[in-house]
Image (cartoon, grey):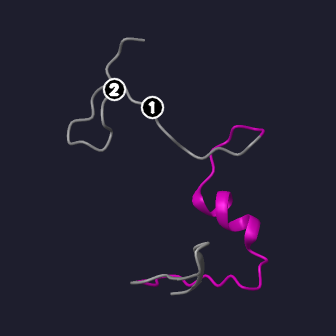
């Protein structure tokens, strides 16, 4: 369109830029992180969610980058 793109994370954000967000497939409604990624896997026995936790390291197993602990 000829409009220069701006960095939305910069200190001066007046201008035009694409905005990326997560949308639910089918109805086009916006999703948050919980609905897009956590809700579909909440029933997994190996999933534990702790509120207000600080993680300093994620432990990965093997070359497939499977997390097995924090």
Task: Calculate the distance from the C-alpha at mark 2 to the C-alpha at mark 1.
Answer: 8 Å
Picture coordinates of residue 49, whole percent (x, y) = 61, 82
* Above or below: residue 13 compared with residue 58: above
Span of residues in magenta:
26-55
Q: Residues within 10 Å of mark 2 (few under 14, many from 20)?
A: few
Q: Is residue 63 left or right of residue 14?
A: right
Magenta region includes residue 46: yes
Q: Which residue appears farthest toward the top when viewing the image?
A: 2
Label 1 sits on residue: 18
Label 2 sits on residue: 5
Picture coordinates of residue 36, whole percent (x, y) = 66, 57
Q: Which of 2 and 42 is in front in this view?
A: 2
Q: Which residue appears farthest toward the bottom when viewing the image?
A: 69
* Above or below: residue 29 compared with residue 33: above
Q: In which quarter of the image is residue 6?
A: top left
Whether pointer 2 and pointer 1 mark residues with C-beta atoms closer than 8 Å, the reply is: yes
Q: Which residue appears farthest toward the front when viewing the image?
A: 63
* Above or below: residue 64 compared with residue 25: below
């Amino acid at each position: 369109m000829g409009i220069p793109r701006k960095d939305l994370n910069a200190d001066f954000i007046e201008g035009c830029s694409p905005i990326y967000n997560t949308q639910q497939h089918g109805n086009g409604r916006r999703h948050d992180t919980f609905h897009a990624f956590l809700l579909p896997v909440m029933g997994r026995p190996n999933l534990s969610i702790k509120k207000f936790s600080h993680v300093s390291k994620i432990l990965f197993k093997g070359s497939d980058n499977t997390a097995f602990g924090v």
